[in-house]
Amino acid sequence: MHEKNQKVLTRQELYDLVWTTPMIDLAKQFNFSDNGLRKICKKYSIPVPKMGHWQKIRYGKPTSKTPLSPGKSTEVDAINILPRPKENLEPVLIVKESIAVPETIEKFHPLVQQTRKLLKKGYERHGRFHASGNETALDMCVSAEQLPRAYRILDTILKVLEQHGVKVGIERVNEYSTYTYVELDGEKVKFELDELTRMVKTEPNKYGYTSTDYVPNGKLVLRINDYLGGCQSKWSDGENKKLEDKLASFVNGLSLAAAYIKKSNRERAEERQRWEDARKEEERKRLAAEEEKERGQALERQAANWQKSRLILELVQAAIAKRGKYAPDSTFAEWVTWATAYANNLDPLRELKPQE
């Protein structure tokens, strides 16, 4: 019996789908992650389009299609694609009303203002401004044309978050990079604002060689830079809806991300505790086994000594019986005394007293 929403495909059917629909769109049809779908294709030796394939199609450039190799004789032809169940999360913040971005802003949020001040000094690379590694700049990477719009979007987001009591900050990762975060329910969620780019080939140089440039295309995207197990982590300009119209969804996405991170951290802590409990139980069993082994070895030594004690005493009595009378101060008498004491010292029962 198949689970609800389960997809059953042959290798050929899945191959046809991944070469006619971009992976990210196909994965959404299955309520699956695109990375998870790629893993399924890899498992069943189904080739997938390389990076840039769909852009070439979009601009009418020629593309090549990797043929599907024959399946192994032992390979199951039916591929079950089970969508990941939706997380049962409880976000602490839900914004129901829409969030409007003003056309003009009289006073920017302090973090936006210090970012503007810093980027005026430069920090441009490949047509986009980005001050990665500076603790006074928000994590953003946009062209000069999109800077005013990006500032207004970030300013609006930060002010809405702080109105709901959410802390926003910039934290250093290492010597070279920082990240922007919000803190919700004790969890930090990293996010950034970027401008998407398109790949453009440069004109051939004097040697006839061309290279590739990534040119800003005017479309902005907000990303949550954490793994969220299938929850939405990207909001961008669309054909019918601009990023400014998706800010409420993004703010709620931040809250959902914090809930997911908190849940994941709790589950990891519980897993670590289970591992620690199992380790302690194994250690307890190991020590108990060692203790039991030592007790057994001690018991075996006692049994051996008891047997030796009895044999020595029997030997002494046999020697006396064969010798007959002997002088108390003779060498034989001395041996009898010593051998008897030695046997008694070996006897593990010598200290046991009869119960009264």
Image (tube, rainbow, N blue to C red):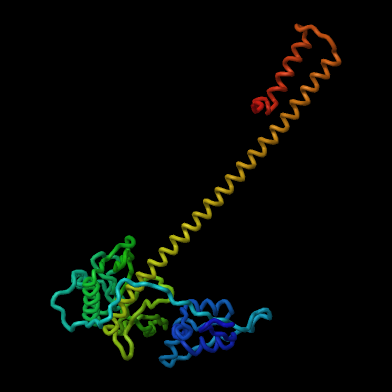
Give the residue furthest to the right.
Answer: 322
Give the residue furthest to the front.
Answer: 356
Percent position (x, y) of residue 211?
40, 80
Q: Is residue 175 above or below residue 348?
A: below
Toward which corner of the image does residue 115 lie, by quadrant?
bottom left
Percent position (x, y) of residue 163?
21, 72
| Residue appearing at x 68%, y 81% in the figure | 73
Query: Between residues 241 and 277, which one lies in front from this camera angle?
Result: 277
| Residue appearing at x 59%, y 47% in the figure | 286
Query: Between residues 295 and 351, which one lies in front from this camera angle?
Result: 351
Name the side, left or right, on which 83 lies relative to 173: right
Percent position (x, y) of residue 26?
47, 85
Name the side, left or right, on which 106 lies relative to 285: left
Toward which corner of the image does residue 194 lie, by quadrant?
bottom left
Res. 310 visible in picture? yes
Name the side, left or right, on which 107 lies relative to 169: left
Res. 180 visible in picture? no
Q: Quadrant of the N terminus?
A: bottom right
| Residue appearing at x 53%, y 83% in the figure | 6
